[in-house]
Amino acid sequence: MKQEYKEITCKSACTKTKRSMPYKWDLNIYRGCEHQCKYCYALYSHKYLESKYKELASNEANSNKFFNNIYIKTNVAEELDKQLSKPSWKNEIIAIGTVTDSYQSIERKYEIMRDVLEVLIKHKNPAIISTKSDLILRDLDLIEELSNLNFVNIAVSITSLDWNIQMDLEPNATFSEERLRVLEIVRQETNASTGLHFMPIIPYLTDSYEHIENMFKSAEEINVHTLLAGPLNLYGKTRGVFLNFIKNDYPELYPDILAMYQNGRVSRDYSRELFNKINKIRKNYNVDTNYIKVIKEKLVDYSEIENRKQSTLFDY
């Protein structure tokens, strides 16, 4: 299917998240994603968009539209500046790229993230940026500048270090080794914290002891701040798309995976066994898995720096 790109305008940049997360705001500069991840949980988002932009999406009737029809919020940086300039804004953490990757290939042309980072720098606003692309290294200069002003976390998601599995799951995403390189460079050249998101972990495909241990080993070698791990869940349209992929590409796993997902969430027994395995492996590596702790520590550090700056102004 031919890739299509459509420019739109947004009324606001950030939306308040209802999820229990260490951040309260989401920002996504694109709708739809070119990575074509078979487990993508964000397929629902085009349904919302179609109701809002019917003239742009009236003939798109299948799940591939999320991967092949990309909407570009051309004014998102301008709206972010307006939002952060309001007296009511509390300088809270903004999570960028939680639904669609801000550094998917179309970003090479539009360079919207550079404008977004400039706005964050202007307002000294903390941010969490998630991606599966090494294009983020293009903006290393701005990430470094922002990281010296306030908390910034750069995270990459990796499902597998096995090239064949990764290509099956994420055919258009940057190779996993290159994503690890992103974290290594960010860690070395900026003051940003780094996170490796080992998720989603897919039953029978990426959940072996060896697979998990290799992820922790890689995280320790590049000295990331945190490693987060979580199992695959299948809600809404994602369930049908993913199970169809497994049925076609890994038919031997289909019956067991289908039985494990009686509803959207993976079975409790599997989840318990998985985290027991992860915790056992974690003890052998110097990698923190407490994401919230790192955020709190970093925010306190920046707060103290800012307080010292303010006190210096009045130090006669």
Image (cartoon, rainbow, N blue to C red):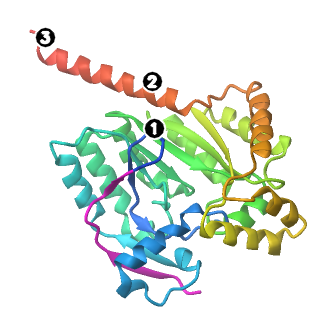
Instruction: Write the residue at 84% across / 45% down.
Output: 208
Q: On screen, 10 above or below 313?
A: below
Sequence-first tag of 3 and 1: 1
The verdict on residue 13 being magenta is: yes
**Disc number for residue 22:** 1
Q: How busy is the neighbourhood of tag 1: few (under 14 within 10 Å), some, or many (20 plus)?
A: some
Q: Which residue is mark 3?
A: 315
Q: Which residue is mark 2?
A: 297
Give the distance between the C-alpha atoms of the residues marked 1 and 2, in whole angstroms. 13 Å
Question: Callout 2, which amino acid?
Answer: Glu
Residue 221 lies left or right of residue 55; in this view the side is right
> SS at mark 2?
helix
The picture places residue 60, in percent across and down from the top left corner, at: 50, 86
Residue furthest bottom in the image? 59
> SS at mark 3?
loop
The verdict on residue 178 being magenta is: no
Q: On screen, 133 above or below 310?
A: below
Query: Which sits in the foreground, 170 or 110?
Result: 170
Please provide the residue range marked out in magenta: 1-16
The picture places residue 28, in percent across and down from the top left corner, at: 41, 59
Residue 36 can be seen in this image: no
Question: Callout 3, which amino acid?
Answer: Asp
> SS at mark 1?
loop
Q: Nearer the viewer, mark 3 or mark 1?
A: 1
Instruction: Write the residue at 73% across / 52% down.
Output: 160
Query: Looking at the rendering, in which quadrant would you find the N terminus?
Result: bottom right
Residue furthest right in the image? 252
Circle 2/circle 3 CB separation < 8 Å: no
Residue 298 can be seen in this image: yes
Query: Looking at the rendering, in which quadrant would you find the C terminus?
Result: top left
